Image (tube, rainbow, N blue to C red):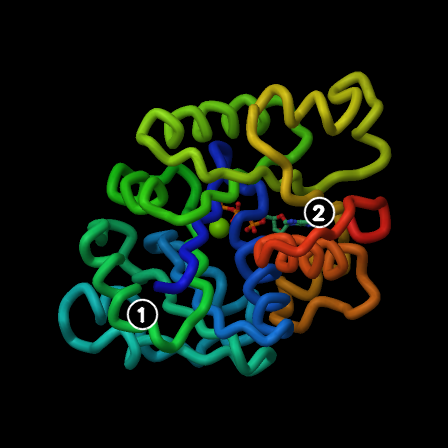
Amino acid sequence: MPKIIAVTSGKGGTGKSTVCAGLGYTLAKQGHRTLIIELDFGLRCLDIMLGMGGEVNSDLSDVISGKKSALDAITQVKMASNLSILCAPKNPFSTVTVEQIIDICRSVKKYFEFIIIDTGAGINSHVFDIVAQANLILILTTPDPVCIRDANMMSDEFYNRGNKSQRLIINKVTNKIIGSSLVSNLDEIIDTIGVQLIGVIPEDFSLAVSMGKGQAIPTNSDSLRAFDAISKRLQGDYIPLTIKNA
Ligand SMILES: Nc1ncnc2c1ncn2[C@@H]1O[C@H](COP(=O)(O)OP(=O)(O)OP(=O)(O)O)[C@@H](O)[C@H]1O
Ligand SMILES: [Mg+2]
């Protein structure tokens, strides 16, 4: 089976979809066949972020209804040939079960090394069950105290459900916020959430622009360096955490 990585957070808007797109992009560029499954029902966005706005003819609803096989419903991303996406249904009220996602993963397993699952804001109980089954859960937070508290609650819930395979990503980090009256240092965030850190992604306007326009992340950007480093850590490489490749 491919490695199934779920990206989740308590609070909405922390950057889950951006991180899924960024990690999918760098894993693919590093030569790994990667699929992103979007579980943000009714609020798909990865088609735009990955430059395929309007060019996605099938989505998860076609697989759930039995109209198409998972392989036929997947769209290949143009900007990274090893990257594919299975978009969320347009209907906000559709649901998918753990069994259906496991079936999908099984049916495409020989084509992908990594399957990344993007969860939406306020995930429903089905998505909770799916995330709990992942080989690795990436808990995403920003340095915002509310977000940190919510990330801690999510992480505890997955621990309680038996999934201890979790890593923390701190997104939208700026020098200004770390050391401010809100957060004194990164260790404070890590200790509060109680999950081992796998990477820090700086707040990067060029990342927001490239995702908004569906363009490749700029090669010289700090965020691309961060995604690159996290992708390598996901493969077990030792990449020290420095300011440059946070
Ligand atoms: N590191 C970053 N630097 C700058 N902007 C970022 C960064 N990460 C995310 N953003 C911006 O933050 C906004 C929210 O990001 P995104 O849609 O990925 O969050 P989300 O957690 O998927 O939201 P939702 O909970 O609604 O699914 C977007 O405008 C995105 O461009
Ligand atoms: Mg999202």
User: What residue lies at 55% left-to-right and 70% top-to-bottom?
Assistant: 50
The answer to which image quadrant residue 60 occupies is: bottom left
> Does the rendering let one see residue 208?
no
User: What residue lies at 35% left-to-right and 75% top-to-bottom?
Assistant: 110
User: What residue lies at 63% left-to-right and 43% top-to-bottom?
Assistant: 198
Mark 1 nearby-residue class (10 Å; few <14, some 14–19, many ≥20): many
Q: Which label sits in the foreground, 1 or 2?
A: 2
x and y percent of residue 111 in the render?
Answer: 38, 77
Residue type highlighted by circle 1? Asp
* 60, above or below 82, in the image: above
- The residue carrying mark 2 is 201
* Mark 1–mark 2 distance (CA, rounded to whole Å): 29 Å
* 222, above or below 82, in the image: above
The dot on residue 59 is: 1
Q: Quadrant of the N terminus?
A: bottom left
Is 209 on the left or on the right of 115, as rendered? right
Residue type highlighted by circle 2? Ile
